[in-house]
Amino acid sequence: MKFYIDTANVAEIREAYDMGIIAGVTTNPSLIAKEGRDYQETLKEIASFMDGPISGEVRADSDTAEKMIAEGREIAALSKNMVVKIPMTAEGLKAVKVLSKEGIKTNVTLIFSANQALLAARAGASYVSPFLGRMDDISSDGLILIQDIMDVFSQYPDLETEVICASVRHPIHVLECAKTGADIATVPFKVLLQMISHPLTDQGIEKFKADYAKAFPTRYRTL
Ligand code: E4P
């Protein structure tokens, strides 16, 4: 499973990119609004250093296929690695069909059932984004959603659509997604940091430092 980062915060993206752990970025209108910056400028800045796929979503006022196609073309023109994120609606599927035929990559978002994922894939989506955290929020098991999609997609090897586990809230979500064989998990920066950290790693570093300093008190500081 590959990791994308789920944020529009450029400093967080740079930090994760420098660690070599992310292969792409996903944003949405809420994440960009949180940064308080111009929509397209934010996407352009991310694209200035990030070499993997960057999902930029059509905005809420783009609610017809026509508007989504027009905004999708603008987003795609920002950089060669832009992916147009489109909500899972009938109009959205029409937009996916047109954009994918033009060679523009699409990520169908707000997926809450395996049927929705299969429809989006058949419309030509490059990616589908099932939201597991938001399923958990309404007392449904989000991991069952991911597993269902992986089970269905594995029946049809002709499908090229990749599954992005989205709405990831904690490291256990990530681990469980990886066990399903999902292609990608898009993970908030905070959760990536939680995944990196382990108390035994921290304790181990402290012990190595202390043991070395005790054995070589003079050399320790100069190395
Ligand atoms: C995915 O592409 C979305 O941007 C994101 O994962 C939504 O997560 P949330 O449910 O925590 O808002």
Image: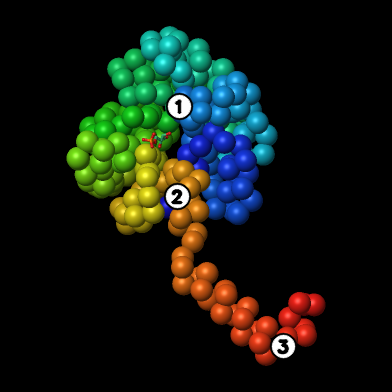
Q: Are marks 1 and 2 in contact (CB under 8 Å)?
A: no
Q: Quadrant of ligand 1?
A: top left
Q: On screen, 36 above or below 220?
A: above
Q: Is residue 50 left or right of residue 123?
A: right
- Report the front residue among 114 and 137: 137
At horizontal 48% and vertical 51% (from top left) the residue drawn is 192
Q: Is residue 187 left or right of residue 153?
A: right
- Which of disc 2 and disc 1 is earlier in sequence? 1
- Which of disc 3 and disc 2 is earlier in sequence? 2
**What number is the disc on residue 30?**
1
Identify the element where label 1 is drawn. Answer: helix
**What number is the disc on residue 216?**
3
- Report the front residue among 174 and 207: 207
At horizontal 60% and vertical 24% (from top left) the residue drawn is 37
Image x and y of residue 169, in percent: 37, 45
State yes or no: Cβ of the residue under disc 1 lies below 8 Å from any atom of ligand 1.
yes
The kind of residue tagged 3 is Phe
Q: Callout 2: few (<14), some (14-19), or many (20+) C-alpha neighbours within 10 Å?
A: some
